[in-house]
Image (spheres, rainbow, N blue to C red):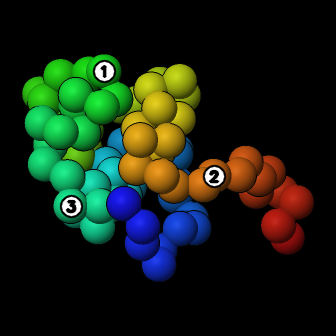
Amino acid sequence: MESEIRYAFVNLSGASQFGEAVRRFRKLRGLTQQQLADLAGCSIMYVSQLERGKETAELGRALRLLDVLEVDISFTDRKQRG
């Protein structure tokens, strides 16, 4: 699954923003919710609720989803960005 979009700013502070990012990257990768759930080791219900902002992702699960979606991440301190 190679794609030109490899980096993006994802706000982990809000469930809806993170869920929207998961949906966007899932679709870019051509995955169904079921395929993502299988690859990430979670339920399709969880993926569905996450994408709709009805569920939050603990850090470990968020990292696993982003890894499956082949999204490189970095952590920044908002205070350092000025």
Q: Reading the chain from its start, which is encountered first: label 1 or label 2?
A: 1
Q: Is residue 39 left or right of residue 73?
A: left
Q: Give the SS element for disc 1.
A: loop
Amino acid at dot 3: Gly
Q: Quadrant of the C terminus?
A: bottom right
Q: Reading the chain from its start, which is encountered first: label 3 or label 2?
A: 3
Few, some or many residues within 10 Å of mark 1 (<14, 14–19, 20+): few
The residue singled out by tag 1 in the image is 41
Amino acid at dot 2: Ile
Instruction: For marks 1 and 3, give the CA distance.
Output: 18 Å
Q: Give the SS element for disc 3.
A: loop
Question: Which mark is in front, 1 or 2?
Answer: 1
Q: Give the SS element for disc 2.
A: loop
Callout 1 touching callout 3 (CB < 8 Å)? no
Tell me, yes or no, if residue 12 can be seen here.
yes
Which image quadrant is residue 33 in? top left
Q: Residue at x 18, y 39 (%)?
A: 35
Identify the disc placed on residue 15: none
The residue singled out by tag 2 in the image is 73
Amino acid at dot 1: Gly
Q: Is residue 39 above or below residue 82?
A: above
Instruction: For marks 1 and 2, give the CA distance.
Output: 20 Å
Provide residue 25's location: percent of width, then percent of height: 34, 60
Q: Which of 45 and 78 lies nearest the eye of the viewer?
A: 45
Q: Residue at x 21, y 61 (%)?
A: 30
Q: Which of 49 and 5 lies nearest the eye of the viewer?
A: 5
Tell me, yes or no, if residue 49 can be seen here.
no
Q: Reading the chain from its start, which is encountered first: label 1 or label 3?
A: 3
Q: Is residue 26 left or right of residue 49?
A: right
Q: Is residue 10 above or below residue 8?
A: above
